[in-house]
Amino acid sequence: MILVNGQALLAEQDGRYLRRAIELSRTARERGNRPFGAVIVAADGAVLAEAWNATAETGDCTAHAETEAVRRASPAHPRERFAGATMYASGEPCVMCAGAIFWCNIGRVVFGIDAVSLRVFRGERAEQRDAELSCRDVFAASPHPIECIGPALREEASEPHQGFWRR
Ligand SMILES: [Zn+2]
């Protein structure tokens, strides 16, 4: 991972799909949810799933974008296909989503805004705080390798969070 000003330098394709995940984070917000989006892309470039955070519109507290994308893609493809796939997430995956990425056998993650920067938006309200365990710590405990790239496009990924979180 090449860092420039504390951010990962992305290949053209990675930038394109991460921007799509950020676009989906705007969709999430427009629909009244927390602004997060995710895309799973296979090694051959096939999009296996797209999703946005749907916790508000479904009432399901586990309907995070990455976990939603795993729920859609996982029943439709063999486990081996995911080893070469990438999860693009507009925000750094939480503990639950990192677990879903692990169980899905996804071999690579590219994320936008990092959890530490997100906490500035989340503030101190208990219901907005996340569990402070990095996805990299979850992936490091995996018996199969999970490459993790990010933060990247932090400014673009931050934009949908402006003015969203309650103070
Ligand atoms: Zn999550």
Image: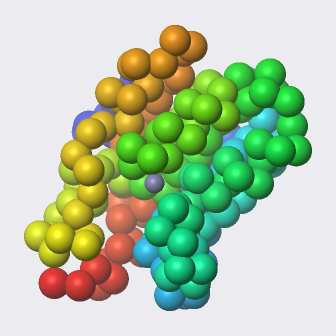
Q: Is residue 89 above or below residue 80?
A: below
Front one among 111 and 99: 99
Q: Quadrant of residue 95?
A: top left
Q: Please state, as top left, top right, bottom left or bottom right, where the N terminus lies in the image.
A: top left
In this image, 153 relative to 67: left or right? left
Residue 12 showing in the rendered view: no
Front one among 83 and 6: 83
Q: Is residue 14 above or below residue 119?
A: above
Number of dots carrying numbers? 0
Colour theme? rainbow
Where does residue 125 sit, x and y in percent of width and height? Answer: 16, 75
In this image, 78 relative to 148: left or right? right
Residue drawn at 39 percent across, 48 percent down: 94
In this image, 12 relative to 94: left or right? right
Where does residue 69 sit, x and y in percent of width and height? Answer: 67, 54
Q: Quadrant of ligand 1?
A: bottom left
Q: Residue furthest front?
A: 60
In this image, 75 relative to 12: left or right? right
Front one among 152 and 142: 142
Residue drawn at 49 percent across, 47 percent down: 97
Q: Please state, as top left, top right, bottom left or bottom right, where the C terminus lies in the image.
A: bottom left
Where does residue 157 sit, x and y in percent of width and height? Answer: 42, 61
